[in-house]
Image (cartoon, grey):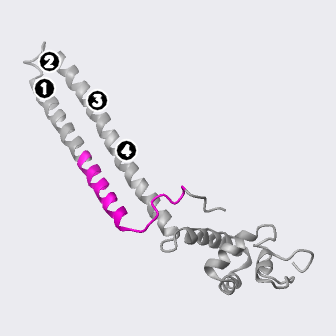
């Protein structure tokens, strides 16, 4: 900043860094890659305009967002951050489906155990608890139907996910190669 070491942007752009340099507080000279990636994607004049339009207290957050988006755009020029968000949303949907299937399976196992327990006690009191036995049979059938429905929805989701992933250019695992926080 006008002193010994120019900021990363002034170094890259090969210009003199002044006290009023808008980039200096956000792009220090010891991290030149930060400005280089943002400059490559957005351009120095656009970054300068964006920073000048913002109040000073919001500029650091804006620079962080620009760096994040620039890293995402370098990795996925078409979708950028949206590709990463889409990937994570698909993972959440898949995990919700798996959770629903596991909960249905647990409920079925519990109902089967209850049915077995009721069936063994029913032999002594068949006349008195005839209605209870019928209810247990209905619950058991309901459990099998619910389990089949959950399984059907899971297969529908998997077939949708595989058909949509084969036809799109979205990176399916944006976190495998490198971090956005480089």
Residue 138 position in % (x across, y down) = 14, 34
Disc 3 from disc 4: Cα separation: 16 Å
What is the secondary structure assignment of the residue under circle 3? helix
Disc 1 from disc 3: Cα separation: 16 Å
Tell whether label 4 touches label 2 (CB within 8 Å): no
Disc 3: which residue? 110
What is the secondary structure assignment of the residue under circle 4? helix
Tell whether label 1 touches label 2 (CB within 8 Å): yes
Q: Residues within 10 Å of mark 1 (few under 14, many from 20)?
A: some
Disc 2 from disc 3: Cα separation: 18 Å
Disc 4: which residue? 99
Report the residue that reaches farthest toward the left. Answer: 127
Residue 177 left/right relative to 157: right
Magenta span covers which residues? 151-176
Foreground residue among 182 and 52: 182
* Quarter of the C terminus within the rendering: bottom right
Q: Residues within 10 Å of mark 2 (few under 14, many from 20)?
A: some
Earlier in the chain: of badge 2 and badge 1, it is: 2
Most common SS among magenta residues: helix
- Residue 86 falls in image quadrant: bottom left
Disc 1: which residue? 133
Disc 2 from disc 1: Cα separation: 7 Å
Disc 2 from disc 4: Cα separation: 34 Å
Tell whether label 3 touches label 2 (CB within 8 Å): no
Report the residue that reaches farthest toward the right. Answer: 4
Disc 2: which residue? 122
Disc 1 from disc 4: Cα separation: 30 Å
Q: At 52% across and 70% down in the image, what residue appears?
A: 80
Foreground residue among 54 and 79: 79
């Amino acid at each position: 900043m006008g002193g010994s070491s120019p900021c990363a942007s002034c170094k890259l752009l090969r210009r003199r860094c002044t006290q009023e340099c808008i980039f200096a507080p956000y792009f220090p000279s010891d991290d030149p890659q930060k400005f280089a990636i943002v400059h490559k994607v957005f351009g120095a004049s656009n970054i300068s305009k964006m920073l000048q339009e913002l109040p000073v207290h919001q500029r650091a957050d804006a620079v962080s967002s620009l760096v994040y988006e620039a890293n995402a755009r370098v990795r996925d020029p078409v979708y950028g951050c949206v590709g990463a968000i889409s990937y994570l949303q698909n993972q959440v949907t898949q995990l919700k489906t798996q959770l629903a299937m596991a909960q249905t399976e647990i409920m079925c196992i519990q109902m089967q155990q209850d049915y077995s327990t009721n069936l063994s006690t029913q032999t002594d009191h068949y006349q008195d608890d005839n209605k209870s036995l019928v209810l247990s049979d209905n619950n058991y059938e309901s459990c099998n139907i619910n389990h089949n429905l959950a399984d059907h929805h899971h297969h529908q989701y998997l077939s949708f996910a595989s058909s949509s992933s084969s036809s799109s250019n979205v990176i399916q695992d944006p976190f495998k190669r490198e971090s956005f926080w480089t």
